[in-house]
Image (cartoon, rainbow, N blue to C red):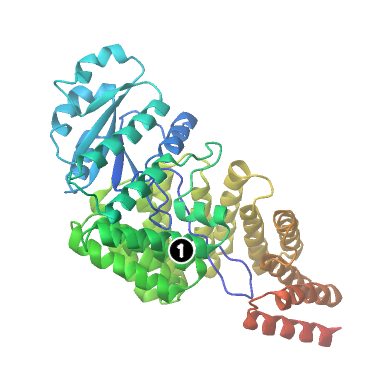
């Protein structure tokens, strides 16, 4: 997301709602830990509201969900795991074809048949013949309840009965039970626990403390290279990253990676998650060559383990495109962004916000290349999607208007630039009404000032530059280069009066 014509640029990394939050590949503490849920249905329509609501409900129970339409792709994916406990939702229509092949796989712990007419599939629910099949279901809520019960049964199956239970083991079981009993607000989009902790405990330090306590319990209760330890380090790294403590985040992610390299197959999806997270930190640290290296490792695994049009592949291409853009390699950036967009068009609904992000990023590359008409077209496509997909005062709409204004400014169409910048500013004033000194307001004031400057209206330019400067000087962590840039703009405007 390009915020300003004179300030440094930054980009929104998208979070896809379906199939887990892997826009940034932040792996959260699973609600039902160390389990994977797979949904196999050849008639799934990801743009359907019922499907999206079902995914939201399922993600309140199991954090990691993969969607497949083709039984062969599903079987190949499951076979890449060795120790992953897998729950499978399968449509009744695919039982005859897929059940005999999937059922014997050791990774499959339980199976849930999802259909409209249960009587047609009674033969698959006979406990004596198919004990892994937990039932035939017509509503997702019932499957969620059954998954929770199956998770408890699986934990109990792993308990070694002895005269005394080690305290560390008891704490681990209690921790899992607490997680399983958490009640979430189904009217809100499901969030990973790192975000949930941040928003509900109000402080990153508390979220960090919770994850560190979980890690200490796991260190006592589990082998030194158990995948759950890697998960804890990953979560701690994500909190540090959100706090801006990138060296600590990197250290935690590296700890996670070292365990995963020992505990998991070389193409396990969890490795892709960690490679992505490390790449993200290097991106924030402006170490672009290192970021690119890790993003490419993420993509390499994802291409082997995911269907060719899976939306997470689009996310990987998007992240790589972002690095090439920052490195000034615009043709490579454009190629990666276009690959991302092509997949998103297949994998996501027509007006999904991630499509808007792709169009925005493509527009930004064209803008950097000086191809302003193409940039404007892409930015306008992004804006049209956001108008449909987002609330009227969403900050992303302000971003779109800002970027359109930027292109008009570059094209010398100052009245259109001014109009777009003003629309962006009005949205920001509403969106940030509780934070009147929000930095994005300074960006808008600066950009409007620059347009007036270009129109030789130096008194108005000076007024807007001064508003931008006041906000920056009140910031608890001021950007000194921005302040110097604004002071320079103010001095030049005064000289022209």
Frontmost residue, 158 versus 284 = 158
**Can residue 194 be seen?**
yes
In the displayed structure image, the side of residue 438 where residue 360 appears, left or right = left
Q: Secondary structure at mark 1?
A: helix
What residue appears at the point 23 percent right and 52 percent down from the top-left corner?
304
Residue 441 drawn at (x, y percent): 71, 65
Q: Residues within 10 Å of mark 1 (few under 14, many from 20)?
A: many
Frontmost residue, 339 versus 387 = 387
Residue 57 drawn at (x, y percent): 45, 35
What residue appears at the point 70 percent right and 54 percent down from the top-left corner?
431
Frontmost residue, 143 versus 462 = 143
The residue labelled by disc 1 is 208
In the rendered image, which quarter contains the C terminus? bottom right
Specify the quadrant of the image occupied by residue 449: bottom right
In the rendered image, which quarter contains the N terminus? bottom right
Residue 427 drawn at (x, y percent): 72, 54
């Amino acid at each position: 997301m390009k915020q300003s014509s004179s300030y440094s640029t930054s980009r929104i990394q998208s979070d896809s709602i379906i199939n887990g939050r892997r826009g940034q590949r932040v792996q959260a503490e699973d609600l039902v830990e160390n389990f994977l849920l797979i949904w196999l249905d050849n008639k799934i329509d990801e743009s359907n509201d019922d499907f999206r609501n079902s995914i939201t409900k399922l993600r309140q129970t199991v954090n990691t969900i993969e969607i497949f339409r083709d039984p062969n792709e599903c079987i190949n994916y499951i076979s890449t795991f060795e120790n992953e406990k897998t729950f499978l939702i399968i449509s009744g229509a695919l039982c005859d074809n897929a059940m005999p092949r999937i059922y014997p796989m050791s990774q499959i712990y339980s199976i849930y048949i999802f259909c409209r007419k249960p009587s047609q599939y009674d033969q698959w629910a006979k406990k004596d013949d198919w004990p892994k099949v937990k039932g035939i279901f017509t509503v997702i809520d019932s499957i969620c309840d059954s998954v929770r019960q199956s998770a408890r049964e699986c934990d109990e199956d792993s308990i070694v009965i002895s005269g005394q239970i080690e305290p560390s083991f008891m704490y681990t079981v209690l921790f899992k039970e607490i997680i399983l009993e958490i009640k979430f607000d189904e009217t809100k989009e499901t969030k990973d626990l790192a975000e949930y902790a941040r928003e509900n405990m109000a402080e990153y330090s508390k979220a960090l403390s919770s994850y560190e306590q979980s890690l200490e319990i796991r260190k006592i209760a589990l082998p030194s290279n158990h995948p759950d330890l890697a998960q804890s380090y990953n979560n701690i790294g994500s909190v540090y990253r959100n706090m801006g403590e990138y060296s600590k985040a990197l250290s935690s992610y590296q700890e996670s990676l070292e365990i995963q390299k020992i505990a998991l197959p070389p193409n396990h999806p969890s490795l892709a998650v960690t490679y992505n997270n490390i790449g993200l930190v290097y991106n924030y640290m402006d170490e672009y060559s290192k970021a690119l290296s890790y993003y490419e490792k993420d993509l390499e695994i994802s291409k082997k383990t995911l269907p060719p049009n899976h939306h997470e592949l689009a996310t990987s291409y998007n992240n790589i495109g972002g690095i090439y853009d920052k490195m000034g390699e615009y043709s490579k950036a454009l190629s990666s962004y276009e690959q991302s967009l092509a997949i998103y068009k297949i994998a996501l609904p027509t007006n999904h916000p991630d499509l808007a992000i792709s169009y925005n990023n493509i527009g930004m590359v064209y803008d950097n290349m000086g191809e302003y008409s193409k940039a404007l077209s892409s930015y306008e496509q992004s804006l049209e999607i956001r108008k449909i997909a987002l609330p009227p005062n969403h900050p992303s709409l302000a971003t779109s208007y800002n970027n359109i204004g930027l292109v008009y400014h570059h094209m010398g169409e100052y009245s259109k630039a001014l109009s777009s910048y003003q629309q962006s500013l009005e949205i920001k004033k509403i969106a940030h009404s509780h934070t009147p000194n929000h930095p994005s307001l300074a960006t808008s004031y600066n950009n409007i000032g620059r347009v007036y400057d270009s129109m030789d209206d130096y008194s108005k330019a000076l007024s807007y530059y001064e508003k931008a400067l006041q906000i920056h000087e009140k910031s608890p962590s001021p950007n000194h280069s921005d302040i110097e840039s604004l002071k320079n703009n103010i001095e030049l405007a005064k000289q022209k009066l």
